[in-house]
Image: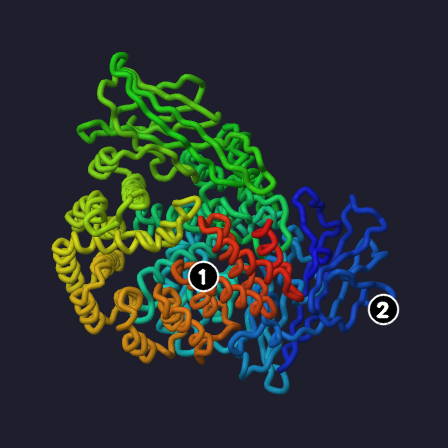
Amino acid sequence: MTKTNIQEKFRKDYSPYPFDLNSVDLHFDFAPKECLVTSKLKFTKKVETDANQDLILDGEDLELVSLALGGVKLSRSSYHEKDNQLIIPDVPDNFTLTIIVKIKPHKNTTLNGLYLSNHKYCTQCEAEGFRRITYYPDRPDVLSCFSTYIEADKKAFPYLLSNGELVEQGDLDNDRHFAKWSDPHLKPSYLFALVAGDFDLLSDKFVTASGNDVALEIYVDRGKLDQCDFAMQSLIESMRWDEQTYGLEYDLNRYMIVAIGDFNMGTMENKGLNVFNTAYVLANDKTATDSDFQGVEAVIGHEYFHNWTGNRVTCRDWFQLSLKEGLTVFREQQFSGDMNSIAIQRIDDVKTLRAFQFPEDAGPMSHPIRPDSYIEMNNFYTHTVYIKGAEVIRMIETILGPDKFNEGVRHYLKKHDGQAVTCEDFVVAMEEVSNKDLTQFRHWYEQAGTPELNIKHSLDSERGRWQIEIEQSCAPTPGQPNKTAFYIPLKLALIDEQGQALPLHGLQSNDDVQLELSESGTEVVVMLSDQRHVIYMDNVHVAPVPSILRGFSAPVNLSYPFYLDECLHLLAHDDDPYVCWQTNQQIIKSVVDALLSASERDEQTVQKLVQPLVESRRVFLAKLKEDPAFYALQLELPSLSYLMESYRPIPIAELLEIWPMVQSAVAIALEPELMDALDLAQEQLKQEPSERQVQSSWRRVFNTVCQTLAYSKTMAALQQICDFYARYDNMTIRQRLLCIISHYYPEHARNYLDDFYDAWQDEELVVDKWFSIQATQGDDSCYEQILELLEHPDFQMTNPNKVRSLIGSFARANPAQFHHHSGRGYSFIAKQVIRLNKTNPQLAARLCGAFNGWRSLDCKERQKLIKSQLEIILATENLSADVFEIANKALQ
């Protein structure tokens, strides 16, 4: 692909579609090797539209059979095709356009539009997949009511599903049958869905708050019905939670979920007919981990919540994607916290943000949550749009308060029901209910990058004045060299020498910065609006320890002199879970920093420098009974991939050397306490099964302790872990133990890997775990192992889950081998990107993103190796726009 083939789209160029689309009637006639699609579109020219306006429809990979306007077939000279658009001049003010096209779903490897997956037809239309089904104004601001008629072979495709309500079904000649669906709600084309296939069906019902019965249906592959109960329970909980929290009821008589094995995205919120990746539906105790269960619950909630925040009110254009996704991710996080642990959910949210979004903000793909331009929209389904977008929504909730925020959401939905709107419309709705001016807050929608807060505090003992200085800055990002000050809600508390939170009623500022005290008076939200603020309090004679950024109140980095005594004081006394977790992370980083600076790294030096880490973990181990899930989380050491993101530039070679030293030293020093914790966890796991959350907490303790013991790489630890592998059949424990054996004792892993595969080879999602474990094995045998696994009969390059589990895991979660000094890891990923570019450009582009952080490495030789692979990718013939955009921006 040459640069002349690439067209960049800009938000500033938006203009409304010149026609109203009054109704859409679709007819799908499935034959073995093709599908005939007939669409009848009723258009009305808008009053403000120019009389000579052409009708322009989008279309890709379509075979046009016929075109009729007002029942009259158009000659070939009456229209023309250009740049994947069908253009019809001289159309009347009101007309019906009938289009017949032929498509070949079985040849559609992109998994966008209508395609065949495991003998089932299904669709993926977001963002621009509907144009691969028929010619259409495929943009989110064109809303219409759809009716859909489907006919197919009855034996091969007994279920024919689409959006809305089933209005008619019956048999046809030649062993065929039909179904007709009608959706009474206005929707854009990206929310259209069709599924035809043979499934097992789990049915239930939900009675809404106003008394309406809703049929709930989950469709899965034959033989998988026993893995659907939790998904159904999660759906019911989601519906109940949305009613209780936001007062939002479901608006159709049927809600369907279909699980599909070949799916580029995780899930899709099509109106009334959600299409899910099997990974987010199928789960039981034998096949799924606790993390899998939480993923199913969260994602089912997310897609259900889209019924209002995304479907009833949708986006005007794709630059506004965070309007629906940021808000819905925030609602999903609220739901998951309420269903499980609010504290751990918040920390997990922050870990995800820091591991994926902060690097994105610091890299070549940096963009605001509302981007100003894109080449390929699929590349902007990003961590920035989704999870930073959710943090922006959370800040609005902090600024307004929970009650006003909920009122604002309801006002926004009522005001814009049935409309396609913008991020600005959402912010205005929040201003209308709160009477707050969010003008400066809008910079979060406009500016890319992660703000940094530089914080210093001091005590003037003679005056009895304690003060804290806060300065904000934001590094330049592509296209934005200079940043305007953000409006940042910073939550703050002060812990005195007795470990008590100080009353903050006397807190003052040198300017007009807004200070909002909590009801208890011991926590304040400082509304930062300038580059620098000074806040102080008098009658303070002993310096308190500040608890900063409580609850992670804003998506920012902190530059603050974390002293060890302050960190230990916060760990002992702070009641904010996030601050306790972050303080723990800071202790870990300070130990690594000390080793990076050490002139010697012998065993004695390492043991001495890791002592703060050891002592803090002794405290966590002693508190396991108080809150097993939280203190297991505290006990965990971060992955090397996560730790790397704390450094710019990344000292990759030194971290690869140092981190195993730290892990081993901690394991050896804590062995007696770890063995006691292991006994405690086993005792708890022997108890009669109680709530899933309780059992999950102790499994987390058990797994974390086993992994920590394995850091020592002693044969005694290996023997114990192997014994546990034989004893426990729960997937959460078994998978982690297999991972531990494979990663820390690779020479002993083969028999266990073979045993695991033999037991689970008929469960695709479990086989995906098996691939991932081997792809993240850090020793040098991993590379040859992956090459062999590419030829494994269960690996399919056409299945995104398989690609993500093997190739994606290697690129994203195996820094030792991806960054191998020879450059073979880079070359391997580049080859897979080029290979996937031919069949699934969207998946190829995601994989290419693994190279985005190359400039942050401290090794020029590694930078040179990655740069050469990006150049090879860009030189590829027929390179897709998806991959071009990622690779080209990485090199700019």
**Residue shown at 22% from the left, 27% from the top:** 496
Residue 291 lies, with reference to residue 546, above or below; the image says below
Helix, strand or loop at mark 2: helix
Q: Earlier in the sequence, mark 1 or mark 2?
A: 2
Q: Is residue 557 left or right of residue 49?
A: left
Q: Residue furthest bottom?
A: 174
**Residue shown at 21% from the left, 43% from the top:** 612
- For residue 811, the mark is 1
Which residue is at the front of the view, 424 or 489? Answer: 489
Q: Is residue 154 left or right of residue 593?
A: right
Quadrant of residue 226 in the image? bottom left
Which quarter of the image is occupied by the N terminus?
bottom right
Which residue is at the front of the view, 352 or 695? Answer: 352
Helix, strand or loop at mark 1: helix
**Residue 769, position as x, y percentages in the image:** 37, 68
Which residue is at the front of the view, 850 or 871? Answer: 871
**Residue 579, position as x, y percentages in the image:** 30, 39
**Residue 9, position as x, y percentages in the image:** 67, 49
Amino acid under label 2? Arg
Residue 205 lies, with reference to residue 387, above or below; the image says below
- Residue 535 visible from this viewpoint: yes
In front: mark 1 or mark 2? 1
**Residue shown at 69% from the left, 69% from the top:** 61
- For residue 76, the mark is 2
Colour scheme in use = rainbow
User: Number of callouts in the render?
Assistant: 2
Q: Marks 1 and 2, how far apart in space?
A: 49 Å
Amino acid under label 1? Ala
Q: Is residue 272 left or right of residue 658?
A: right
- Residue 111 visible from this viewpoint: no
